[in-house]
Image (spheres, rainbow, N blue to C red):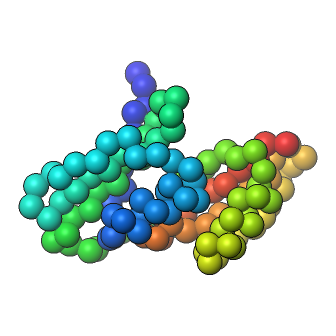
Amino acid sequence: MKFCWSTLKVKNLEESLKFYQEILGLEIRRRFSAGPNMEIAFLGIEDGGTEIELICNGSSDEIKVGEDISWGFEVDSLDKVMALVKEKGLAIHSGPFQPNPNVKFFFLLDPNGFKIQIVENL
């Protein structure tokens, strides 16, 4: 079995695409209309792997976000990503934390309130 994607319902597809491309470095793998007032975009990295599916339903802007769920993204430099986040005018939700000598991380929120964990393995 292979984990292929995780789906997020988003309020504004363009705003969400900008976040996932500019902050997390994901690329649009495919994008298409899925009916009246609905558009879907899949994002991922060049070498494949798990994707994020963003669904924007123009007929509904209600988003339900669970506070205890987060997505983790590994980076080479936590400091560089923190600087990018600040440069883009985004707030750091919490952290940075270093629970042990091998890892440090912080959290930020995407445009829909989903919690994103940025992790550097030391």
Measured from the top left, where is residue 51 in percent x and y? 43, 40
**Residue at the far right in the pictured view:** 101
Give me the residue at 28% from left, 48% from top.
31
Q: Position of residue 121 (x, y in %)?
A: 78, 42
Q: Horizontal placement of 65 versus 36: left or right?
A: right
- Image quarter of the C terminus: top right
User: In the picture shown, does residue 11 fall above or below 98?
Assistant: below
Image height check: is 46 above or below 19? above
Q: Which of 42 and 92 is in front in this view?
A: 42
Residue 11 placement (x, y as % from top left) = 32, 70
The image quarter in which residue 3 lies: top left
Instruction: Specify the farthest residue to the left.
Output: 36
Say above or below: 56 vs 75.
Answer: below
The residue lying toward the viewer, choosing from 46 and 96, is: 46
Q: Residue at x 42, y 59 (%)?
A: 17
Asked whether residue 69 is in view, the answer is: no
Quarter containing the N terminus: top left
